[in-house]
């Protein structure tokens, strides 16, 4: 029983990281109908931004560790928001009226460009570096359960960000405009919406979430390197498809589900080597049964 | 109010408009008639910036809007109810209307919403409903209401009668006249149903394969034997 609860907690922590990344994929898909493969690299850049921000402020880390952690996370999120919007502006916007496959291939190109530029010794270098522990480390023990303060922080921050995103998308004018652009960009432009700006904001929001996810991921596996985004990026992409690409609650559900499946499969001794295989097999089964994903639904328009 | 001069539009190798010229004066209802593929919708799309013109100019209140993006044109007071209505089927009726008032402040939007509800009481009854579940006629009311939310000076209407029950078509055309009369909104109306369009419009233009072939008062067009045989069913 304790073992089950422990795995549940681990799975949720990992799953919430996937969920944060998956949201970025699904938001961009919502407005532009393509998969931004460079998204996984934005999460790596978020981790590196945090790494350098933390290294530059050792005094603050010692004096006010929580404030310092908050500053580092917020700073990395801001940097990535700008980078994400910049990637869209430079690489994708010039291709706005081109076939979608062109944009897709460009996204792969952007991803490789970022990964290999960052591996250059003059940039980050290919070696793995140890990531600083931003949050004070405490392991709480609760009736046989070990709760790491990192996992709790990740869960808390994720919940906060999800609530914030939900509020923005559902309750603000910007959110209604985002949903309108996702549904029909031409119609949105006829309402006076600057579609280009909404797309920039979408990239910025998704990239900020990816930065937070990158930091959370780095905290769990305390080494960072320029290819660190690939694995969680692929998983989160799958989570987004699993939940129904373009659907925000779907991305969260898919992320949590994938995190849980992976953790539970990894926790069984006989199966731990097959955890990815099990996760992907399950994904295939779900997609055979529900091709649009768990929450994905085509909403036909009356003409 | 709206001046279109020598507008040429191409889709790849196909030329859809060959130098179309027409003008709409403030307070008028002008209708654009023509068969399928004559270029009626393309003309409207070129005016509102959805389709780039190869050459020619569109000016609105004396200002050249030919190269402006759609959202800048809307800001100047030119509304467009597009072909197929293009309502946001994933949003509620109220959210659709809110989008229509995207450029207005909150207080202005609320005030404008009351006016739209007065014009289309049906929208008020359905305000919390997801727009995709409305009937065709209600969706058309929503599309017009949404465009009215932006307080346009001029409205482009693309086939408001398409796919709607005859009884509702009559009601919608009455609303179009009302909008023109009481709110003083200038209207450029594209319509397949020439009888109905000429009954409400002051003037009309006939498009054939991307060219304006006739332009006259509605009464004169209705009496014109060519128009009679081609568009009014003898």
Image: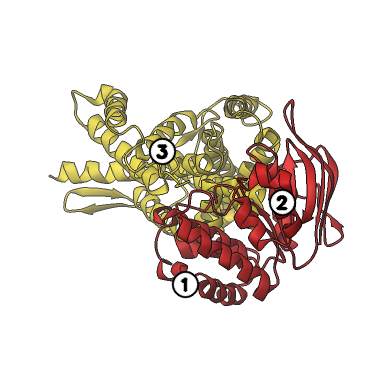
Chain colours: A yellow, B red
Q: Position of residue B35 (x, y in %)?
A: 65, 40
Q: CA distance from mark 1 to mark 3?
A: 41 Å
Q: Are marks 2 and 1 on the same chain?
A: yes
**Residue A2 shows in the view:** yes
When the figure is inspected, residue A83 is found, relative to residue B131, above or below; the finding is above
Query: Circle 1 marks a residue in which chain?
Result: B
Q: Residues within 10 Å of mark 3 (few under 14, many from 20)?
A: many
Q: Position of residue A160 (x, y in %)?
A: 42, 58
Q: Position of residue B8 (x, y in %)?
A: 81, 38
Please tell me whether mark 2 sits on a helix, a strand or a loop.
Answer: loop
Q: CA distance from mark 2 to mark 1?
A: 28 Å
Please tell me whether mark 3 sits on a helix, a strand or a loop.
Answer: helix
Specify the quadrant of the image occupied by residue A48. top right
Query: Circle 3 marks a residue in which chain?
Result: A
Disc 2 designates what residue? Answer: B48
Report whether A202 appears left or right of B129: right
Tell me the quadrant of the picture where the N terminus of chain B can be found.
bottom right
Q: Position of residue A170 (x, y in %)?
A: 46, 60
Disc 1 designates what residue? Answer: B121
Disc 3 designates what residue? Answer: A240
């Amino acid at each position: 029983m304790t073992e089950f609860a422990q795995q549940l907690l681990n799975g949720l922590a990992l799953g919430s990281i996937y969920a944060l990344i998956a949201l970025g994929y699904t938001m961009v898909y919502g407005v532009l109908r393509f998969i931004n493969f460079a998204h996984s690299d934005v999460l790596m850049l978020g981790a590196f931004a945090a790494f350098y921000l933390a290294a530059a402020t050792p005094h603050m880390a010692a004096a006010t560790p929580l404030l310092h952690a908050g500053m580092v996370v917020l700073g990395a999120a801001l940097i990535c928001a700008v980078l994400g919007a910049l990637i869209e502006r430079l690489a994708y916007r010039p291709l706005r009226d081109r076939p979608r496959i062109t944009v897709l291939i460009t996204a792969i190109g952007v991803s490789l460009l970022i990964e290999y530029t960052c591996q250059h010794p003059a940039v980050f270098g290919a070696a793995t570096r140890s990531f600083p522990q931003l949050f004070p480390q405490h392991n709480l023990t609760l009736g046989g359960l070990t709760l790491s303060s990192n996992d709790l922080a990740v869960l808390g921050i994720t919940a906060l960000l999800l609530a914030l995103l939900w509020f923005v998308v559902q309750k603000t004018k910007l959110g209604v405009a985002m949903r309108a652009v996702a549904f029909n960009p031409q119609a949105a432009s006829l309402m006076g919406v600057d579609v280009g700006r909404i797309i920039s904001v979408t990239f910025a929001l998704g990239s900020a979430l990816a930065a937070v996810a990158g930091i959370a991921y780095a905290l769990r596996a305390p080494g960072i390197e320029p290819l660190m985004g690939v694995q969680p990026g692929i998983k989160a992409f799958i989570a987004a498809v699993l939940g129904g690409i373009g659907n925000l609650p779907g991305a969260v559900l898919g992320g949590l589900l994938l995190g849980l499946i992976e953790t539970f499969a990894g926790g069984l001794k006989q199966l731990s080597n097959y955890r990815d295989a099990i996760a992907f097999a399950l994904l295939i089964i779900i997609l055979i049964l529900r091709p649009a994903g768990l929450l994905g639904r085509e909403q036909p328009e009356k003409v | 109010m709206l001046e279109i001069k020598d507008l040429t539009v191409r889709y790849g190798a196909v030329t859809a408009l060959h130098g179309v010229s027409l003008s709409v004066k403030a307070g008028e209802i002008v209708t654009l008639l023509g068969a399928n593929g004559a270029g009626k919708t393309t003309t409207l799309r070129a005016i509102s910036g959805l389709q780039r013109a190869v050459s020619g100019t569109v000016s609105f209140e004396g200002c050249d809007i030919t190269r402006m993006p759609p959202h800048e044109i809307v800001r100047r007071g030119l509304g467009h109810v597009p072909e197929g209505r293009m309502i946001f089927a994933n949003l509620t009726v109220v959210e659709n209307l809110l989008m229509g008032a995207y450029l207005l402040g909150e207080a202005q939007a609320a005030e404008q919403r009351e006016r739209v509800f007065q014009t289309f009481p049906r929208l008020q009854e359905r305000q919390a409903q997801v727009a995709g579940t409305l009937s065709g006629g209600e969706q058309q009311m929503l599309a017009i209401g949404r465009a009215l939310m932006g307080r346009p000076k001029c409205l482009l209407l693309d086939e408001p009668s398409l796919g709607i029950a005859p009884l509702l078509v009559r009601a919608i055309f009455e609303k179009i006249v009302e909008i023109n009369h009481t709110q003083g909104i200038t209207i450029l109306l594209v319509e397949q149903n020439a009888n109905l369009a000429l009954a409400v419009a002051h003037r009309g233009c006939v498009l054939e394969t991307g060219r304006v072939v006739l332009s006259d008062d509605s009464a004169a067009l209705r009496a014109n034997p060519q128009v009679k045989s081609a568009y009014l069913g003898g």
